[in-house]
Amino acid sequence: LLALNITHPWNTARTLLPHMWRLGHMPLMAAAGRPLVQHTQVLEKLIFRLGVGEPDAISSQDIRWYADRFRDPVCAQVTTDTYRTFLLHELPAGARHPERRRATVPIRVLHGSADFAIHPALVSADTVIADDYSVELLAGCGHFGPEERPNQVRSQLVTLAARNPV
C-alpha cells in the first residue's frame, strides 16, 4: 500500500486532538460544500493555496482545472457528503471503536512535510499497528504530493511494486 498524505487508522484522541484545528475547513465543507465549490473560489483561494507547499509547485491553470471539475453538481454534492460522513459517522465511530487490527501488507507513506491539513505526527510509525510500515517525508511538499512531487511518487510506487510482486 502506498499512502499519500492521509492519516493512518491507528491514531487515537491523544494523537488527533492537538491537530484538529487544522481540519477547520471540514465543518464548513460538510455544511455548505456544494454551494461553496459551485459558486465561489474557495478551492482556488483557500484549499490550494494552503495545501501546496511551494507556491509554484502547481500551476494556476492546473488549480483552475481541478477546481472547475468540482463545480459539476454531482461532484459538488459528493464534496459535501464526504465531509459530512467523515465528521458525523467515521470520526465518532473511530473514537468509540479504535482500530486495533494489525496491518500485514507492506505500507509506505509519502507525506508532505509542509502539509497544512495533516501534521506529520498523524502518519508517525510510532503509533501504527503494522508489520511493515515506513514514512518518507517529502521536504517542502504540501498536501498534494502526486501533483507536487510526481517523480518521487512514481519512484516509490515502482520500488514498492518491484519488492512485492503479485
Image: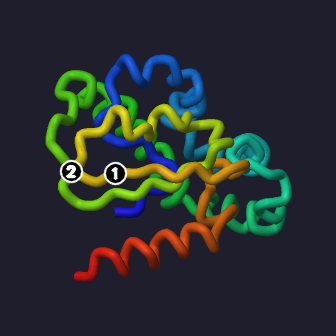
Instruction: Point out which mark residue 26 bears.
Output: none
Which residue is depicted at the point 41% across and 36% down?
84
Name the residue type under label 1: Tyr
Q: Which residue is mark 2?
A: 103
Classify 153 as above or below 102: below
Where is residue 3 shown, x and y percent of the image? 42, 57
Secondary structure of the residue carrying numbered label 1:
strand
Q: Is residue 77 visible?
A: no
Percent x, y of residue 25: 59, 32
Whether residues under marks 2 and 1 lie with C-beta atoms below 8 angstroms apart, the answer is yes
> Horizontal and vertical percent for residue 115?
63, 42
| Residue at 38 percent of width and 40 percent of height | 125
Q: Earlier in the sequence, mark 2 or mark 1?
A: 2
Mark 1 Cα-neighbour bin, 10 Å: few <14, some 14–19, many ≥20: some
Label 1 sits on residue: 133
- Locate residue 154 relative to residue 151 in the image: left or right: left
Above or below for 134 versus 10? below
Left or right: residue 61 compared with residue 123: right
Q: Is the N terminus in the top left, top right, bottom left or bottom right quadrant?
A: bottom left
Q: Which amino acid is tagged 2?
A: Ala
Secondary structure under tag 2 reads loop
Quarter of image, res 47: top right
Q: Residue at x 59, y 65 (%)?
A: 146
